[in-house]
Image (cartoon, rainbow, N blue to C red):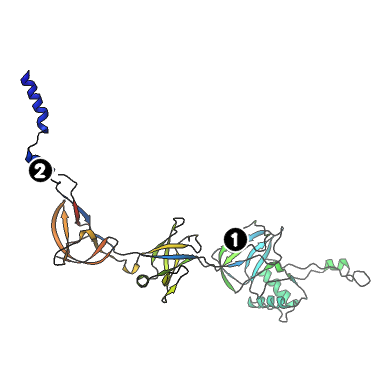
């Protein structure tokens, strides 16, 4: 019985017993394990970070003509489309079924022009008709020849020219000088309502926004109908001399709004050659950028602009900087690894270093480093065999 107990105790305790030599060996640090990385072909660049501000683009706003607003003024058709080039004489829209034309005048139409009238507005109308290929009168009088030209102008656009209502005039004795039945028999003379003329600055514009739709009731005379020749919102930034020397037109980057955390892609469209000082007191060379797609809604707010130097963005053979080692004589090398073991040292010449990567310009022997090759970047001593 005693022998059995001693045997069991020996089996239980023996595994926990270590010789002094074994204890010392166990106390040694673990055998180091290689930490490797892969050679890549990539752009080795240091991004340029600048500050910029959004510049809101401008546009020409087209508001309703004089006399074209009111409870009965309803948009019944919109003929000008976004992106369309509009020229003088085009029908922009219909208000309550009546056309509204684009005309290049020096001032807004301020009255309904009807037969027999004269004045600068009649002259502007005649000039427009003449530019569009018609042959109106030339004396600034809305005569019969001008009326014929206006009728043709309307008909060529698919409309019937509006006509003024004729009224019987009273004689000094109080009697009508023209009998009512005579007035009814005479066809009213053609007219150009002031509400049918939208005045433009020049003969050609591009529609960048349509601000109304069919069914819109025009009650506000300041409400925009369209926006023309709108310039997209952009960004102005200031870069240092070193940064601007490496920035090129067409370069792509990111704009970051510190307030909202939103990010938008941007592209460089212009680089100034003369130094400036911006509103924030930053001195350097001006850079103009446009948004690629939807702009940030951050008017005049400071943004962080990150630009990758596109002039240096060609892909090169590169390794992590931690894979490059130096010898006492100043030469540099990388160590190849295979199956977790050191294979061979390769002498290298390093070019640009940026973003934690080093460009490999030259190797000796050549051709030993290729994309996918494993190189040693360090040792991990926490792994036990």
Which residue in the protein does label 1 denote? Answer: 211
**Nearer mark to the viewer, of 1 and 2:** 2
Label 1, label 2: how far apart the Cα atoms are: 83 Å
Q: Is residue 157 visible?
A: no
Q: Which of marks 2 and 1 precedes in the sequence?
A: 2
Task: Residue 134: give x, y in percent of width and height.
Answer: 66, 77
Which label sits on residue 347?
none
Task: Residue 271: give x, y in percent of width and height.
Answer: 41, 72
Q: Quadrant of the C terminus?
A: top left
Q: Is residue 147 visible?
A: yes
Image position of 113 (left or right of 352): right
Question: For the residue labelled by badge 1, is the local secondary structure a helix, a strand or a loop?
Answer: loop
Task: Residue 261: give x, y in percent of width and height.
Answer: 44, 55
**Residue shown at the point (34%, 67%) measured from the top left:** 310
Give the residue furthest to the right.
173
Q: How many marks?
A: 2
Q: Quadrant of the N terminus?
A: top left
**Residue shown at the point (8%, 27%) measured from the top left:** 10
Task: Residue 338: give x, y in percent of width and height.
Answer: 16, 53
- Depth check: give the residue in front, 263 or 209: 263
Q: Residues within 10 Å of mark 2 (few under 14, many from 20)?
A: few
- Depth check: give the residue in front, 280 or 305: 280
Image position of 375 (left or right of 67): left
Which label sits on residue 25?
2
Q: Is residue 27 above or below residue 115?
A: above
Give the residue furthest to the top.
1
- Depth check: give the residue in front, 244 or 317: 244
Image position of 181 (left or right of 22): right
Question: For the residue labelled by badge 2, is the local secondary structure a helix, a strand or a loop?
Answer: helix
Give the residue furthest to the left.
3
Give the image quarter of residue 361.
bottom left
């Amino acid at each position: 019985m005693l022998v059995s107990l001693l045997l069991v105790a020996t089996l239980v305790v023996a595994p926990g017993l270590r010789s002094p030599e074994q204890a010392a060996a166990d106390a040694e640090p673990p055998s180091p394990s290689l930490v490797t990385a892969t050679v890549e072909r990539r752009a080795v660049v240091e991004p340029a970070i600048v500050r910029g501000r959004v510049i809101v683009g401008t546009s020409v706003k087209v508001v309703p003509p004089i006399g074209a607003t009111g409870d009965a003024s309803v948009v019944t058709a919109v003929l000008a489309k976004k992106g369309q080039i509009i020229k003088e004489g085009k029908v922009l829209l219909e208000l309550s079924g009546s056309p509204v034309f684009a005309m290049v005048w020096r001032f807004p139409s301020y009255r309904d022009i009807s037969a027999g009238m004269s004045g600068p507005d009649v002259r502007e109308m005649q000039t427009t008709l003449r530019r569009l290929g018609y042959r109106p009168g030339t004396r600034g009088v809305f005569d019969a020849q001008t009326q014929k030209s206006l009728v043709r102008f309307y008909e060529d656009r698919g409309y019937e020219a509006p006509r003024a209502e004729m009224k019987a005039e009273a004689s000094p004795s109080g009697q009508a000088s023209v009998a009512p039945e005579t007035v009814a028999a005479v066809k009213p003379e053609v007219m150009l309502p002031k509400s049918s003329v939208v005045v433009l600055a020049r003969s050609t514009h591009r529609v960048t926004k349509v601000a109304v739709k069919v069914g819109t009731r025009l009650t506000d005379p300041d409400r925009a109908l369209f926006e023309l020749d709108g310039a997209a919102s952009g960004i102005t930034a200031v870069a240092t001399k070193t940064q601007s020397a490496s920035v090129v037109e067409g370069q792509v980057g990111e704009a970051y709004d510190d307030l909202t955390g939103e990010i938008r892609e941007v592209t460089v469209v212009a680089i100034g050659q003369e130094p400036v000082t911006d509103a924030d007191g930053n001195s350097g060379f001006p850079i103009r950028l446009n948004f690629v797609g939807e702009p940030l809604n951050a008017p005049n707010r400071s943004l962080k602009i990150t630009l990758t130097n596109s002039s240096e963005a060609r892909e090169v053979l590169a390794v992590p900087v931690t894979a490059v080692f130096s010898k006492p004589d100043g030469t540099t090398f990388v160590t190849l690894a295979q199956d977790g073991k050191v294979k061979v040292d390769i002498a290298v010449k390093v070019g640009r270093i940026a973003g934690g990567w080093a460009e490999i310009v030259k190797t000796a022997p050549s051709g030993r480093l290729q994309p996918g090759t494993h190189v040693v970047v360090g040792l991990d001593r926490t792994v036990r065999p």
